Structure formats: structure tokens, C-alpha cells
Amino acid sequence: MKTVTCTAPVNIAVIKYWGKRDTSLILPTNDSLSVTLSQDILHSKTTISASETFTSDRLWLNGKEEDITKNKRMHNCFRETRALRAAFEEEERRHGREVAPLSTWKVHVCSENNFPTAAGLASSASGLAALVFTLAKLFDLSTNMSYLSRIARQGSGSACRSLFGGFVAWEMGSEADGSDSLAVQVAPESHWPDLQALICVVSDAKKGTSSTEGMQNTVKTSPLLQHRIKEVVPARMKQMKQAILDRDFETFANLTMQDSNQFHAVCLDTLPPIFYLNDTSRAIIKLVHEYNNASPDGKLRAAYTFDAGPNAVIYAPKEHMKEIIQLVAHYFPGAADGSYFADPYRILQSNEALGAIPANDRFNAACIPVFPVGAVSRLLHTEVADGPRVVGKDESLLNADAIVL
Ligand code: DP6
């Protein structure tokens, strides 16, 4: 039996992917670009065991056994990696080298997120990236990440970007078979370590439209999406890459906010319209603009972005993060049970209270009302970080019999 355990990070796009030109190969209608966030805060972990004695493929997701054959997207990732392994075995045998026939063995897979899925945070990107990276390690495949990203892409589009750390572009490509639709690293995490993120988990009782379904309705019905694809994204991708290379937060912030707003505008331009933002999300948008407006040196200090749900991600340089956390905590207070803010980077002094507004005359404290406790349920402070990691045997999610622990 062979067992491997790996973790993969979450990524949050600053130029959004929204729309497919091929729904089975998962080929997008535009390029996108994201920032990889620290696995110390959010990650998916996957353990896979392969053995000649297993009688069927088995899958446990967040503690629950699921039918692997019903999960088409995961199935695609297995098919592709097994085919690569089979080709490798063939090659080894041709050279007279002995090799275990892993491509024919059944597998047991267990995957978990270290964050509650109920929090509404994207988990498909980190989950599918962890699956593909672990399969590649299990099968001794090349870990050329751009190469593997073409497989992860077929699990979930945004997953292809979670194979790299730092700043990552997904090039849409033009080939019908998807061979040139892959992720590339624009810059590693070490390039701009000063950039941090604050995830504001916004409470939402409704079950929203899934990205997969929502984006295809947009492709079918939104004329604005066509303008975005042809005119807006190509220019923005160039500007965003340059802003990252120059560590130019001003340009990065403006483009990030504009692109989030345009993504939600094409959702509104869909028939019937898709609403992902709620009153809390919109108040966070206003707050960030007011905070930037009152900036003493006139420079932008924070940028918001929202995916297919109401949660906000605020990117900001490290030096302003404490003030931003204080500000958000003031207008969106959390429950007093300690679940609101864990302070992983120790930005608060011991006993320092949360919820101060900036001591700055230019800041209009009445820009938004103070929301009831729980409108934002959690604040997760995180930073730009590395791609997937192989972890030790002691972190395995399967026991010695390859059954979920
Ligand atoms: C709004 O990658 O979840 O987060 O390819 O159908 O699995 P599928 O969609 P998914 O879509 C992500 C959409 C987004 C923007 C982004 O991450 O670029």
C-alpha cells in the first residue's frame, strides 16, 4: 500500500473568471488572476492510499463517505492522472525497469477543509487542487504545476490557480482540446510579502446560485459579459500583472475593486439576475471607499473583492491591516465567545479591545450604521503564501487500514 497526504491553499481572484466556452473541459471565456492565501489559515487536506488489495475506489469528503462514480469532475481528475501513470509504467517497463502497477490499483481518498463549509468560503479550488497534487505525488508524476493545472482545471476552473503560491494567472488559451488553458505564476509569494488579506465572513441564510450554474446563465443572457470578455479583461490583465510586478498597491487596489464590481454587474445583467452581495456586503464596500477617501496621504489603503457569495475579502498592505480590522470590528461587531477574531499574527496587544475607528478628522464615522452583532460572523486575517505542500504521515486522514479516522 502507498499513502500520500498533501494540503492545498485557497486563492481569491482579483481579475475574475466567470463564464465557460466549454463546460466539460472547463475552458473559460477570459483570463483570470488570483492571489494564493496562507494554508496556515485556510486549506484543504487530502490523503490518498492505493493498494492492490482494495476492491473499489472509495471517497470521504469532510467525514462523510460519498459515491466517487457520481462525482464527474473528480472522476475526470482520476482518469487523467491514471492515464499519465499508465504511460509512465509502460515507459519504465520498456526500459526493463520494475514498477508497481499503481495505475490499475483502487484508491481510498479522504479530503477535509480546516474551515467549516457552512462559512460559505470557496472550497472547490483548494479541494480539487489538493486532490490533483496528491494524485501526482502518489503516482510519481511530474510536478510541473502548469502541466498539472490542466488536470485541476477539469475538477473546478479556479482550482488550477491553487497549484501555485503567490500571484497566479489562468491563461484561457485558444485550443479546442484545452491544452493551452493553464495556470502560470506571475510572481512568487516572496515578491510582495507585505500584501495581506482580511476575509470577512458575512452571514447569509439563503442558499445562493452555484458558480457553475450562474456563470453559464450569464454566458447565455448577458450582453455586458461580451464587452467584458473582449474589451475589459484583456487590458486589465496586462495592467494587473504590471501592478503586481511593481508592487503598486494603488493600481492593484483600483483594478481589484473595479473587477469585483464588474463581475457583480454581469451577474445583475444576467436574466434572471443573480444577486450575490447583500446589505452587509454593500456596507463593507462603502466603508472601504470612505476609509480610502480619508487616507491622510491620499493613497489607497484597502481594496475589497467578492466572489459568488456575500463574503468580503479585503486586500491591504500589512501596515494598515490593524486599523482595517479595528474598523470592520467597529461597524460589524462579533459575538463575545472568541469565535470572531483569532488574531493569528498577534496584531493586538494583550487586553487591547477590538472596534476602534480611525482617529482621523476626514473620516466620516456616519458613513454606514453599526450593524447588529453577527452580521459579520468571523474575521480571518491571512497573507500571500505558498502553493500545495506534502505533509508528514502523522497528518494522514486515513488509518493503517486506509479507512477514515
Ligand atoms: C467568482 O471555479 O467555482 O470565484 O469552474 O464551475 O467549478 P467551476 O467554477 P468556480 O468559479 C469561481 C468563480 C469566482 C471567480 C474566480 O475565482 O475567478
Image: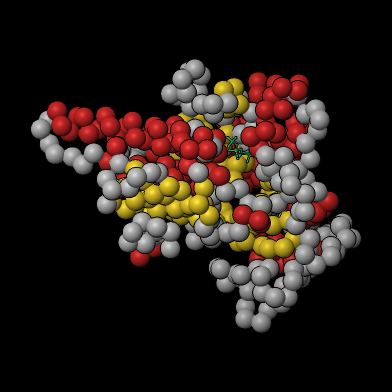
**Farthest residue toward the bottom?**
351
Asked if residue 357 can be seen in this view, the reply is no
Query: Where 185 sits versus 346, above or below?
Result: above
**Residue in the picture at 84% in, 62% down:** 371
Across and down, in percent, residue 16 comes to 63, 36
**Farthest residue toward the front?**
55
* The C terminus - image quarter: bottom left
**Residue in the picture at 27% in, 52% down:** 1
Of 28 and 228, nearer the camera is 28
**Residue in the picture at 75% in, 37% down:** 264
Of 225 and 122, nearer the camera is 122
Across and down, in percent, residue 145 comes to 39, 38
Left or right: 123 in relation to 181: right
Query: Where 287 sits versus 269, above or below?
Result: below
Query: Where 75 sits versus 313, above or below?
Result: above
Across and down, in percent, residue 302 comes to 68, 52
Quadrant assignment for ligand 1: top right
Across and down, in percent, residue 346 comes to 57, 72
